[in-house]
Amino acid sequence: MRLKLVPQDTSVDFFRHWKTTFGASVVAMVLSIVAFLVMGLNFGIDFRGGTSIRTEAQAPVDIGEYRAAVMPLGFGDVAITEVFDPAFGADRHVAMVRIQAQEGTEAITTEQISAVRDALQALDPTLTFAAVDSVGPKVSGELIQSAIISVVLALAAVLFYIWLRFEWQFSLGAVAALVHDIVLTIGIFSLLQIRFDLAIIAALLTIVGYSLNDTVVVFDRVRENLIKYKKRPLKEVLTVSINETLSRTVMTSVTTLLALLALFILGGDVIRGFVFAMIWGVIVGTYSSVFVASAVLLRLGVKRDWSKNSGDTSGTQFGVKES
């Protein structure tokens, strides 16, 4: 007996309230942009510049005592957070100490790191530095620029590929879905103030690929059905196409989420931000393939028969020429 998350034949009307769902997506995007402008992102050392020190000790972490020990050293902005992970043993207590980039230097010196170690070991002699990562202000600025360029180029490549693969209406629908996914991901990171570093940029690019794959599967079926059902309105063809691919979409999303949830729970704090971005991306990517990309396609209309290479533009949603 095979497991079926979705019945074999479904007839869900995804476009009964398409204006409401599309409007909700637009509102969510606007709120995400507002959150980004007002709250900003919690940039990691990769983008902000500075030094990140991961400490491990046998005694419980007291953030107040850690800060009181480090602040007299005069390093400016120092952020200290305790790291929780189910995989840690009872005698393993981990903290992350972030020190801002020092004026006139790319990173704090070895002597300054030693001073931080001595100050913290005065509180707990068992404390050790498990990892020390430094990024200079100049490098962090270049990383921000490169990250923005990489995302923009990815969207441009998608736009060009879908335009060649289908038509410009499909291309705009796919890019609208991708922009929706990226904006909402940045919005949730801004709202929750989750650390935003290079790993999150990698997650954004992965989300672009995942969402695009889901959208292309739906669009492929739409194109087939537009040729097959020449007399059906575009809305009905889109509904049929989404229902026909619904089982595949749900199965892919659920199996991906199962793997990601396992990584989120057991993978440790180092990759937790990346995995969270992926989980969020799978959810909004699946949603956007149905309620954003297809809604844009419905609004723009498309040619009904690719076998006819004529200049007739009447074969759109608003002027269908049936055969």
Image (cartoon, helix red, strand yellow):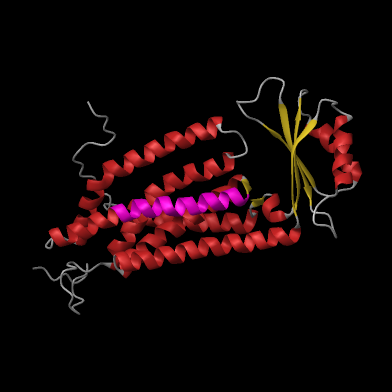
Left or right placement of residue 117 versus residue 226 in this view: right
225, 109: nearer the viewer:
109
Q: Tell me which secondary structure the magenta stretch mostly adopts.
A: helix
Q: Quadrant of the C terminus?
A: bottom left
Q: Residue furthest front?
A: 110
Range shown magenta: 197-217
Is 206 in the magenta? yes
Residue depicted at 33% across the width and 52% down the height: 290
20, 309: nearer the viewer:
309
Can residue 28 be seen at all in this image of the molecule? no
Q: Is residue 127 above or below residue 103?
A: above
154, 123: nearer the viewer:
154
Q: Quadrant of the N terminus?
A: top left
160, 169: nearer the viewer:
160
Residue depicted at 65% across the width and 59% down the height: 143
What x and y, as percent, mark residue 213?
A: 36, 52
Can residue 216 be seen at all in this image of the molecule? yes
Residue depicted at 52% across the width and 45% down the height: 277
What x and y, as percent, mark residue 237?
A: 20, 56
What x and y, as percent, mark residue 24?
A: 41, 53
What x and y, as percent, mark residue 186?
A: 55, 53
Left or right placement of residue 60 versus residue 279 in this view: right
Left or right placement of residue 79 versus residue 272 in this view: right
Residue depicted at 47% across the width and 37% down the height: 260
Q: Residue furthest top?
A: 90
Is 175 in the magenta? no
Residue 307 in which image quadrant: bottom left
Left or right placement of residue 264 versus residue 13 in this view: right
| Count of numbered tags | 0
Q: Is residue 313 above or below residue 207?
A: below
